[in-house]
Image (cartoon, helix red, strand yellow):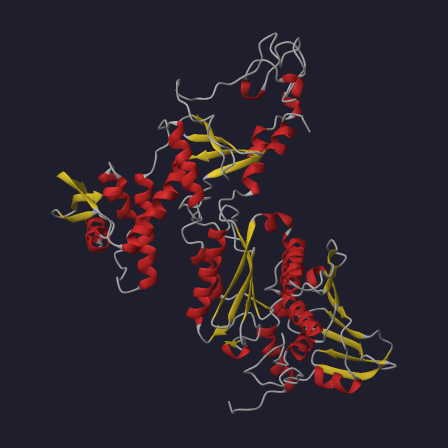
Amino acid sequence: MPIRRLDETMVNRIAAGEVVERPASVVKELVENALDAGARRVEIATAAGGKGLIRVIDDGHGMGADELTLAVSRHCTSKLDGGLDAIATLGFRGEALPSIGSVARLRIRTRRHGAETGAEISVEGGQVEGPRPAPANRGTLVEVRDLFHATPARLKFLKGERAENSAVTETVRRIALAFPDVHFVLSGPDRATCEYPACGQGEGASLRRIAQVLDQSFVDNAVSVAADKEGVRLAGLAGLPSWHHATANRQFAFVNGRPVRDRQILGALRGAYSDMLERGRHPAAVLFIDIDPADVDVNVHPAKADVRFRDPGLVRALIVGGVRRALLEGGVRASTRDAQKMAAAFAVPENDLAVGGGQAMPNGWQAPLGSPGSANGAAAGFAENGQAGFTVMPQARPGDAGDASESDDFPLGAARAQVHGTYILAQTGDSVVLVDQHAAHERLVFEALKRAMADRPLPAQMLLVPEIVDLDPERAEAVCAAAATLARFGLEIEPFGPGAVAVRATPAMLGETDAAGLIRELAETLDPELGEAEPERLRARLEAIASTMACHGSVRAGRAMRPAEMNALLRQMERTPGSGTCNHGRPTFIELKLADIERLFGRR
């Protein structure tokens, strides 16, 4: 078959395969055009998940009739005055409108500011009609109907109406976060109206818009991020490690105001939380990166969701360092979600509080006659009148002093009791704090291991008799291959025949430890293919080893602690960055405010 030139309609339909993937792609392109036109209000309406109708109305500067024909022609744009090396607008390729017009029914009505009348143009299946005079408000109305009617095969790849609606909503949310000074309205017969009023300008405006889009709970459980390095600036909010989620859909990144889904940025964010989250959980964050346009390439893909940095190492270091520093400087904080779960666990459902002699109480406890919760006592439940005469003695050793004398002015307060040999109950001036002693001490030991490892190899404690640990041959080989790395932690091993390892010394800072259990757990995590020359993977290996050792060397659940020990643990937590979660990502403490407790007991 001879080579021939494709007609313009076919070229546009081919381009539409990359530019217009689904209704959300159309919304993104049209809203970006509106913002580039200086719009301060953008209204988006959809029907049938965007497949039936997408309408975008803006109050931007509009277009003249002479520009409409160019607007729907391929590779015509007003946004590249500075060339590809200095792109300062959201759009620039000149592909969106002709691509949309080639696969749908497109209508554009516009009026330039100061013009007496407007103009309209239509494109259907690549065929252009107009422009022609039409009444119009200042700005532009773009209407897209019957998406992919000209390429029905593409319709098969679209998801259901609800899923497409959700994708459109997510697109508008991301753009709204980047432009807090613009009023956005998203509506339609198939959805609830979603409106984001303009929040003004400045840092406060960005926080207000984040609260609008992601709700106030995220702002209450996040720390401010602000960092700069060699002309690259980073700002935004990073969620507390304990405010984690099952998916990464609460991670938003923007480069020079452009919403992106860049793997480099998301990978750096994961690195910042590397030893603070449970496996399979994801942090929440909104990050804004400002960089010289000449140092970033946004012309990577027609969808413009990926970017390439001239110095990716610099950007990664800025994100990892900036987010980590913000989390550490944020101090010891518990997420409000954990407190809400705790309050919900204590709350007694009304239908569990029956009225009558000897009624059944929660968990099957039978209230004795004459007790405050019984019929001939005061009112049932946690209300104030129902408390008299009901006391629970704390689990503390007789004769121990110091728990009552310790000041509660500290952030984590003063230890008052140990519950079930596992949890420390502390009191602050306006709250009650419940600490998981094992998880808290695990984080402290982990941080101490990392600090000590950064300075010099850890001191080793020689065993009088080497301990022989039997393993699978492959596991034993992996452990022995990491002998030099383990020696940095004070763990000295050597091969002892096939499938066995001899432990000659353990880290001194761990004290007495189960060497065999430690080796077996390390054998499960070590990667025999890991090369020592790879810094990032080596750091990950070192932190994994430190995490395992910390778990074996921390205070175990069930161990009784004296008040002085409990308070010492609290004070050390307050001095240790990142102590709000253990190195597996679980919370180390939960704080319940006095006001919440009073509500539980009916005092409020």
Rendered image quadrant of residue 563: top left
Asked if 532 appears above or below 591 in the picture, the reply is below
- The residue shown at (83%, 83%) is 132
Question: Would residue 501 be found to the left or right of residue 438 on screen?
Answer: left
Number of numbered discs overlaid on the protein picture:
0
In percent of width and height, residue 33 lies at 69, 74
- Please provide percent x and percent y for residue 307: 51, 72
Q: Report the front residue among 202 and 45.
A: 202
Identify the residue at image location x=60%, y=51%.
219
Residue 396 versus residue 287 in the image, above or below: above
At horizontal 63% and vertical 84% (from top left) the residue drawn is 75
Q: Is residue 341 left or right of residue 546?
A: right
Q: Nearer the viewer, residue 117 or 447?
A: 447
Compared to residue 22, the image places residue 138 above or below, namely below
Q: Residue at x 47, y 25 (%)?
A: 404
Can the viewer see residue 467 in this picture?
no
Q: Is residue 556 left or right of residue 301?
A: left
Q: 18 or 225, which is in the foreground? A: 225
For residue 397, what is the image quadrant?
A: top left
- Where does residue 459 sit, x and y in percent of width and height? 22, 47
Quadrant location of the C terminus? top right
The answer to whether residue 211 is visible is: yes
